[in-house]
Amino acid sequence: MLGWLPIAYWEHTPHPFLIRFSETLGIRYYGLGYLLGFVAAYWLLNRYHRAGRSPVAPVQIMDLMMFMVVGVMAGGRLGYFLLYHPEDLFHPPWAFFQVWKGGMASHGGFIGVILAAWWFTRSRKLSFLKVTDVIVTTVPVGLGIVRIANFLNGELWGKTTDVPWGVIFEQTGGGNLPRHPSQLYEAALEGLLLLAFMQWRFWKSDVARRQPGRISGEFLAAYALARVVCEIFREPDAALILGLSRGMFYSLFLAVGGLAVMALAKRRTA
């Protein structure tokens, strides 16, 4: 499988805690990643409003953030079980609430955010697509930071490889062969690159004003593409579906949904 091996590969040592109080208690990088993602989103939403480019008033931003937190956490957690490990949802019955053991699904988090945004905009009588257009431009920050936390945890590693930057994840179950640091690939594509694309589209065009929903659709399609590319290098963490990893399979639906939203945005403004 491996054509050649250099003298030495870097052996990963897991670093799940920023500050550790006991064996299982402390400030974890994974949770900190979500927190920083929400803080960045709050800052960006305020900046958008000051620039006159957001339908969400300053007094509504904190309310929106609360909706987003609930949507991300509930959707991501439920999505993890339903999309990847349905057999573990009620084993034990309180498994859903054992968040300290990890287990979040980005696809489930997206569904949770969509539902939370719909609820928020309906209760505040705001345009759903205009609000989602500003939300999606903030999402890649959290995605990128959480992927870095995945790497620090030594989880969700990639397939075996002989590239010089391969990493050995033996301490977290990856065996003694070098693997793609696919978490960092995802941090770069789903986080940094997608953030740059979203910010460029938001600030350097008036598409958000001309075609509400267009940026939302572009985000879904672009994320799906980035995720599919990363899944090529990532070791599947659940049974395949039609020969595809679950991350790749579910991303196809996101891509179709993104294209549909873009088509709807165009038709509504035609």
Image (cartoon, grey):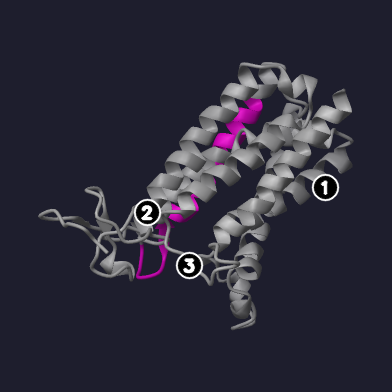
Magenta residue span: 21-47
Residue that protrudes farthest toward the left in the picture: 7
User: Answer yes or no: do the residues labelled 3 and 1 have beta carbons within 8 Å?
Assistant: no
Which residue is disc 2 drawn over? Answer: 151
- The amino acid on which the numbered mark 3 sits, given as a three-letter code, is Asp
Q: Nearer the viewer, residue 182 or 56?
A: 182
How packed mark 2 is, by other alpha carbons closer than 10 Å (few <14, some 14-19, many 20 or more), is many
Residue that protrudes farthest toward the bottom in the picture: 92
- The amino acid on which the numbered mark 1 sits, given as a three-letter code, is Trp
How packed mark 3 is, by other alpha carbons closer than 10 Å (few <14, some 14-19, many 20 or more), is some
- Tell me the quarter of the picture where residue 52 sits: top right
- Give me the disc on residue 37: none
Q: Identify the mark nearer the N-term, 2 or 3.
A: 2
- The residue mark sitting in front, 1 or 2, is 2
User: Answer yes or no: do the residues labelled 1 and 2 have beta carbons within 8 Å?
Assistant: no
Which residue is disc 3 drawn over? Answer: 237
Task: State how far apart marks 1 and 2 are (Cα).
Answer: 34 Å
Seen in the image, is 84 located left or right of residue 229? right
- The amino acid on which the numbered mark 2 sits, given as a three-letter code, is Phe
Quadrant in which the N terminus appears: bottom left
Q: Nearer the viewer, residue 253 or 134?
A: 253
How packed mark 1 is, by other alpha carbons closer than 10 Å (few <14, some 14-19, many 20 or more), is some
Quadrant in which the C terminus appears: top right
Which residue is disc 1 drawn over? Answer: 119
Can residue 17 be seen? no
- Tell me the quarter of the picture where residue 232 sits: bottom left
Task: State how far apart marks 3 and 1 are (Cα).
Answer: 33 Å
Say if the magenta span includes residue 249. Answer: no
Say if the magenta span includes residue 45. Answer: yes
Q: What is the secondary structure assignment of the residue under circle 3? A: loop
Task: State how far apart marks 2 and 3 are (Cα).
Answer: 15 Å
- The residue mark sitting in front, 2 or 3, is 3
